[in-house]
Image (cartoon, grey):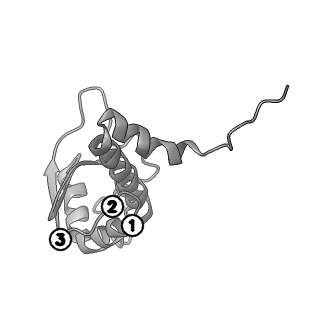
Amino acid sequence: MTERRRPMRRLADLLPDLAGSLGLEDELRLSRAMASWERLLSEHVPAATGSSVLLAVRPPALIVSADSPIVAQELHLRSDELLSAFAGAPGGSRLLELRISVRPPPAGHSGRSRCSGSWPRRGDGSSGGDV
């Protein structure tokens, strides 16, 4: 007696249907957007990796946090570039505004924990160029 097996499917292909049946579509969409934000941040503003988190997508705005004012300023300066990249990312969408909220990291958490670089400081001999 032989069993007939169903073809294997990728888990990523099953999640949208499962999330829909459980009423978790919005949470799945936000999770994808958050992962895309982290990835594009590491590509476009590597020094800010680990210092910014996507909080919400509320068209026409993408709302993110920054651990410090300098990270917020860098995100603001690159907002057009980041919004364009987010529009083409999985889970992303075309938005018109990047809203940044400066929120210090929770106690006992260094906002730079996942960051391999550091922000240049005045007088440290760095070129002061792109961070």
Q: Position of residue 52 (x, y in %)?
A: 29, 49
Q: What amino acid type is highlighted by mark number 1?
A: Ser
Q: Quadrant of the N terminus?
A: top right
Q: Nearer the viewer, residue 94 or 22?
A: 22
Task: Describe the element under mark 1 as helix, strand or loop.
Answer: loop
Query: How many neighbours does mark 2 have within 10 angstroms: few (below 14), some (14-19), or many (20 or more)?
Result: many
Q: Nearer the viewer, mark 1 or mark 3?
A: 3
> To which quarter of the image does residue 96 belong?
bottom left
Q: What amino acid type is highlighted by mark number 2?
A: Gly
**Are the two marked residues, 1 and 2, in contact with CB atoms closer than 8 angstroms?**
no
- Identify the residue position indicated by label 2 in the image: 92
**First in sequence: mark 1 or mark 2?**
2
Residue at 36 percent across and 57 percent down: it is: 91
Question: On the rendered structure, is 75 left or right of 58?
Answer: right
Task: Describe the element under mark 3 as helix, strand or loop.
Answer: loop
Q: Establish if 41 lies above or below 103.
A: below
Q: Nearer the viewer, residue 18 or 125?
A: 18
**First in sequence: mark 1 or mark 3?**
3
- Identify the residue position indicated by label 3 in the image: 96
Q: Nearer the viewer, residue 25 or 107?
A: 25
Q: Position of residue 57 (x, y in %)?
A: 21, 54
- Identify the residue position indicated by label 1 in the image: 126
> To which quarter of the image does residue 90 belong?
bottom left
Q: Position of residue 63 (x, y in %)?
A: 18, 54
